[in-house]
Amino acid sequence: MPSQTEEIKQRLDIVDLIKEYVQLTPAGSNLKAKCPFHNEKTPSFMVSPEKQIFHCFGCQAGGDHFEFIKRIDGIEFPEALRILADKAGVKLDYHNPEIHSRKTKTFDLCDDIALYWHQKLKNDAGLSSIRSYLEERGVKSRTIDDFLIGYALESWDESIKYLQHKGYSLLEISQAGISCVSEKGKPYDRFRGRLIFPIRNIHGNAAGFGARKMKDEDTGGKYINSPQTDIYNKSEILYNLDQAKMEIKRLDYAILVEGYMDVLACYQAGTKNAVAVSGTSLTEGQIKILKRYTQNVMIAFDADVAGTLANLRGIDLAWQAGLNVKVIHLPDGKDPDDIIRESAEEWRQLVAKADNYMDYIFKVTLENLDLSRIDHKKKAAQKLLKVIGKLGDEVETAHYVKKLARELDVAEESLRKVLLRLKAQLRNQKSPAGEESTSSGFVKISNGDYQRALAERLLSLLIKFPQQISFISQQLDPEIIAENKAQEVYKMLIIHYNKEQSFNYQSFIKEFSQEHESYLNKLLLLSEVDETKDTHLVLHEEFKVIIGRLKKDHFNNKIKEVGQKIARAEKEKNQDLLKELSEEFNKLMSQLKEV
């Protein structure tokens, strides 16, 4: 009978799992994408449907279903196990200690209190005024259910007592951000007397809460959020992404708003791809999460000064991350919630007429300047040319230089000269420190990296063509391979093949500890993307070249080591050692010549 982890992996296709986060495209028998774990322009992230593994050849991340979820969500194995079990429909044995952790218990606590507050709002006879408020704001009963909106009673400790009754300790309640401690050292409910908006992670678990006060005389801000906890970081979570992610993928764009009520209004108006930053300006972490689902974002922040500044910061961050950004222009003093309650059709028209990011930046930069003044013209040129200078497309660059020349009533050629200077400055700023470049502009690869790549090429070919293992083992001693992990795998390949007289990858990897899993998966995917044909002549020529290079590197390194020892022996006038080392040196030189 398979273990629960094996049962989950059997039921879940890793391709379907990763597709929820990454846009995959075919690459032979595999699939590829830009890696979700590091920034890259050329896809180096590979997924094998046959072997049910992934590997990134850029950052070396790799593994199975569990490793992917752990990395993408920044969680430990117990949380990954529970998430994947839920997706696979596998019922876990909750007596098993490996599924419990502090984080999983915090998620359970937040889910429990979210449901409790929601049921209070729906059923408590004393909360009719809160329900009336939501009705007046146009929030429908179905929406309250879909978003699990709730209410925390005004009692100082009612929520705490409920959670204690459920078996949670005061420490766990505090660590989840549900309670605070008074000056007298007594715990009290953080969100007492507030309307509650559960902020759920991508899997639909409550991770934190936004809370709106319902009485003007109450202390604290109009909205407050959970503090940072083990499971909640406001700069790396988006309100409603758990429900919006599939619609974002389907439509291939997301609408980004500021508040919870904006999301609810969008949702009810049929805009199911809206998410909110909830209590923060747009961050790099949030952009990274959005990029899993789309490359296109529309921003709809309030049309006040703070909203404009937030727009500009968000545009710059999103644009630098490679997103295509548009801005939805909101009438002064209104947010999406206001507009939709007045007219859902007006909202749809504003979305349809959204400006692209360059037109928006032109608009907000120029609207407060007096372009009859030369100093204002210079200020506009400097600011906008810096943005134009970052454009990668020549046609787009030419278009906006011409537009700026027209707006400022200056010669295009003058702006182009300034632009060239700014581009040169940008190139200098982008040059990475510490990389040694050749005269051709290529970054030099260290000898260690080169040897490692050769060894990995050899091993991937042997995994692809295991019938060559016996032949290659006669041509290449394991000690020739410098990299320890590669040498160990090479030895085990020889032992495994000689013992079994065949090669099975799944039984082979069982001979290694878990720390080798990522490395072995990398070799496997290298073998699968390799296009070398199984012809005797081509294959043996390939092996001959690799073995020759490995041997040359090995003997050159040995010669260098012995040469250093000879220099020390001469300095110490150790004639016996000098004679021994000289013989070793000559032997190595002879071996090198034979390669």
Image (cartoon, helix red, strand yellow):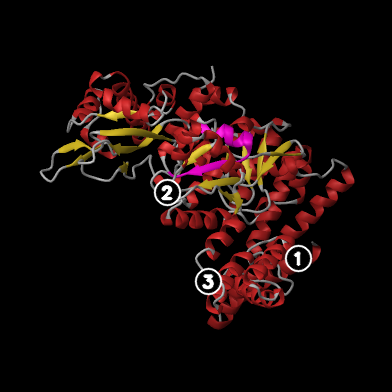
Q: Is 104 placed left or right of 220 in the picture?
A: right
Residue 513 seen in the figure: no
User: Separation of disc 2 and disc 1 at Cα?
Assistant: 79 Å
Residue 245 on the magenta span: yes
Task: Tell how many labels.
Answer: 3
* Tag 3 secondary structure: loop
- The percent coordinates of residue 481 (x first, y second) are 66, 54
Residue shown at the point (31%, 43%) measured from the top left: 224
The residue at 55%/83% (across/down) is 571
Q: Which residue is mark 1?
A: 592
The percent coordinates of residue 260 (x first, y second) are: 41, 38
Determine the CA span between mark 1 and mark 3: 76 Å
Q: Which quadrant of the rendered structure holds the C terminus?
A: bottom right
* Disc 1: CA contacts within 10 A as few (<14), some (14-19) or many (>=20): some
Q: Amino acid at mark 1?
A: Leu
Residues rendered magenta in the picture? 243-258
In the picture, the quarter occupied by the N terminus is top right
Horizontal arrangement in the rendering, residue 594 relative to residue 503 (left or right): right
Element type where label 2 sits in the image:
loop
